[in-house]
């Protein structure tokens, strides 16, 4: 996986907010699961998702759905 060599402070703020908001919404507190969400956020960012609304939608789409 390749990450951009430069992330602006605005990008970092958005990524941090996305992590915190997602973990709060889905009650994720365990470090291993939180780390996995952080990794996924970076993968999504690297693939071109660079705004808060799109990031939220992409993260939500990755959550398992109960049957």
Image: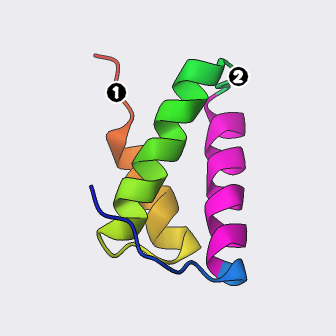
Seen in the picture, residue 32 relative to 42 is either above or below; the reply is above
Element assignment for label 1: loop
Does residue 53 appear to the left or right of 13 in the view shown? left
Does residue 65 appear to the left or right of 51 in the view shown? left
Q: Main secondary structure of the magenta part?
A: helix
Seen in the picture, residue 3 relative to 62 is either above or below; the reply is below
Residue lying farthest front? 5
Seen in the picture, residue 23 relative to 21 is either above or below; the reply is above
Residue positioned 30% across, 63% down in the render: 2
Q: Residues within 10 Å of mark 1 (few under 14, many from 20)?
A: few
Q: Nearer the viewer, mark 1 or mark 2?
A: 2
Q: How is the image coloured?
A: rainbow
- Find residue 29 and report its horizontal and vertical position in percent: 70, 22
The C terminus, quarter of image: top left
Q: CA distance from mark 1 to mark 2?
A: 17 Å
Residue positioned 33% across, 26% down in the render: 65
Residue matched to label 1: 64
Instruction: Give the camera-side residue of 31 and 67.
Output: 31
Residue positioned 64% across, 25% down in the render: 28
Does residue 33 appear to the left or right of 66 in the view shown? right
The magenta stretch spans which residues? Answer: 11-26
The N terminus, quarter of image: bottom left
Residue positioned 45% across, 44% down in the render: 39
What label sits on residue 15 in the rendered view?
none
Residue matched to label 2: 29
Instruction: Give the camera-side residue of 16 and 2.
Output: 2
């Amino acid at each position: 996986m390749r990450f951009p060599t430069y992330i602006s402070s605005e990008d970092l703020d958005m990524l941090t907010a996305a992590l915190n908001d997602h973990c709060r919404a889905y009650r994720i507190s365990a470090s291993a699961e939180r780390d996995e969400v952080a990794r996924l956020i970076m993968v999504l960012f690297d693939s071109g998702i660079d705004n808060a609304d799109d990031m939220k939608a992409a993260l939500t789409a990755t959550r398992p759905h109960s049957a």
